[in-house]
Image (cartoon, helix red, strand yellow):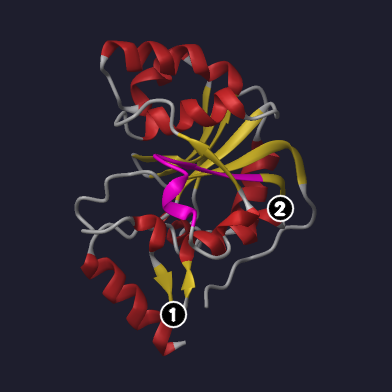
Amino acid sequence: MISFEKANEKIKNVTAAILCGGKSKRMGFDKAFLMDEHHYLLLETARSLKSLFEQVVLVSDTKSKFADVEGFEEFGILEDRYIQKGPIGGVSTALEQIQTEYAFIMACDMPLMNLGLIDRMYGKLGREQVLLCSHGEKLEPLFAFYHKSCLPAFRKRIEEGELKLRSAFSELQVGTYCLSKAEISAITNLNTPEDVEKWSRNISKK
């Protein structure tokens, strides 16, 4: 089982949105159904986020893939309005439909998600439209806070066919949270079967 660091209290003006509609080409199967031993990683992540955020939603290419899978009925599912547009489409879909000022966006394939880190990031949030993690020169746009005012810039990029989230950052107020060495693991992604095998071995050793 995954161990999540806990935060002190719930965040009320942010909706947590997990992106789970990717093509998963390198993985070979839908990463929304990655399993931690006998449990879906996505469900574990969503349930853990529920202890920090009052609202947690899943953003998927289709609702139907979760229809017969036990547990997913606990969460609202937003169908992606920008089909095959990648993460920028998923983020835009979330920002269009949430009722809160901000969304906390993360990918569904982060097995070491850290609630304490998210809470610390929120504590750093000021007037930024985007607050994302950084490590050295690397930015992680899929573990980040986005304000609803980001929408026009993202829609513009989608219309232009520029589908990288960071392509819109020049038009937005962007802040970064510099990860410590102890925090870097929180943004680890599982992208290939080899990644999953290594992760599974680590779990079995604990």
Which disc number belongs to residue 10?
none
Res 129 seen here = no
Residue matched to label 1: 37
Left or right relative to 47: residue 36: left
Residue 16 image offset from top left, x and y in percent: 61, 43
Task: Tell me the element at label 1.
Answer: loop
Q: Quadrant of residue 142?
A: top left
Q: Magenta includes 119?
A: no
Note whether 198 is above or below 95 in the view shown: below
Res 40 seen here = yes
> Which residue is found at the position 63% from the left and 61% from the top?
48
Residue 8 image offset from top left, x and y in percent: 78, 57
Amino acid at dot 1? Glu
Amino acid at dot 2? Leu
Front-most of 65 and 122? 65
Q: In which quarter of the image is residue 147?
A: top right
> Which residue is found at the position 32% from the left and 11% from the top?
159
Residue matched to label 2: 52
Left or right relative to 32: residue 131: right
Span of residues in magenta: 56-67
